[in-house]
Every structure is written in structure tokens, then in C-alpha cells.
């Protein structure tokens, strides 16, 4: 996939390439991170990049897909989470100085109540 902008792949395109192992989750992620780092100084879309965690997840997806454990269209596809959704340990400042150093202790539960 040399020379191709992997960060522009649709989910359908990426999932087909991942499932057939024509491209790895790590390759897509690294191209995406490179693009984010290049464009974010202008767009300022990202408050936090969980690079270490993303690389771990991409590596795990590559191992699973390599074993034939492909789990579906999103398996190995990098994604972003809007800073309005709690992710444990990720800064969540809501563009406010009051919350500048705050990070949630647990992930959002989607409003589900425990039964």
C-alpha cells in the first residue's frame, strides 16, 4: 500500500484490506497519526492523542487478524472519540481552565443503569 493515503480509506475499504491482510492495522494507524500531527496545528481537532494505547490496540488487532480471528468491519480501524465522552485517564477539559488538569477515572457507560 506504499504511496497510498491510508487515513482516507473508508471503513469498508479499510476493513476489506485488513481482513485480506493487504494492509495492517498498524500501517493504517501510523499513517493516520502522521496525518493528525501534520494537520492538527491548523485544525486543532484533537485535545489528546492516545498514541501508546492506539499502537497497542493496532498490534493486538494485527495479531488477531493474522490468526484468522477477524471480528468484523471495525476490527483494526482507528477511530476518534469526541472529548465529551469520558475515557478513563484521557484529559477532558471541555475547553475550560477549571477542568484543565481533569481526567475521568472510568469510561462513560452510555447512560446504562446497572440492573
Image (spheres, rainbow, N blue to C red):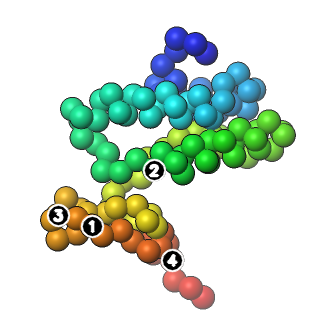
Q: CA distance from mark 4 to mark 2?
A: 25 Å
Give the number of the disc on residue 35. none
Q: Earlier in the sequence, mark 2 or mark 1?
A: 2
Q: What residue is shown with label 3?
A: 96
Q: Secondary structure at mark 1?
A: loop
Residue 33 point in image, percent of width and height = 44, 34
Q: Quadrant of residue 93?
A: bottom left
Q: CA distance from mark 4 to mark 1?
A: 27 Å
Q: CA distance from mark 2 to mark 3?
A: 20 Å
Q: Quadrant of residue 15?
A: top right
CB within 8 Å, label 4 to label 2: no
Q: CA distance from mark 4 to mark 3?
A: 27 Å
Q: Secondary structure at mark 3?
A: loop
Q: Earlier in the sequence, mark 4 or mark 1?
A: 1
Residue 56 point in image, percent of width and height = 61, 47
Crowd band around label 3 with a 10 angstrom C-alpha radius: few (<14), some (14–19), many (20+): few
Residue occupying image coordinates x 54% and y 51%: 53
Q: What residue is shown with label 1?
A: 101
CB within 8 Å, label 3 to label 1: no
Amino acid at each position: 500500500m506504499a504511496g497510498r493515503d491510508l487515513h482516507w480509506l473508508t471503513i469498508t475499504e479499510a476493513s476489506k484490506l485488513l481482513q485480506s491482510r493487504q494492509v495492517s492495522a498498524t500501517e493504517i494507524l501510523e499513517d493516520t497519526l502522521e496525518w493528525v500531527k501534520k494537520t492538527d496545528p491548523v485544525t486543532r481537532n484533537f485535545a489528546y492523542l492516545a498514541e501508546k494505547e492506539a499502537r497497542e490496540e493496532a498490534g493486538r488487532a494485527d495479531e488477531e487478524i493474522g490468526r484468522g480471528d477477524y471480528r468484523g468491519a471495525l476490527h483494526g480501524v482507528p477511530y476518534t472519540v469526541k472529548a465529551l465522552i469520558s475515557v478513563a485517564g484521557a484529559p477532558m477539559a471541555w475547553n475550560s481552565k477549571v477542568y484543565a488538569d481533569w481526567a475521568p477515572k472510568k469510561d462513560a457507560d452510555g447512560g446504562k443503569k446497572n440492573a
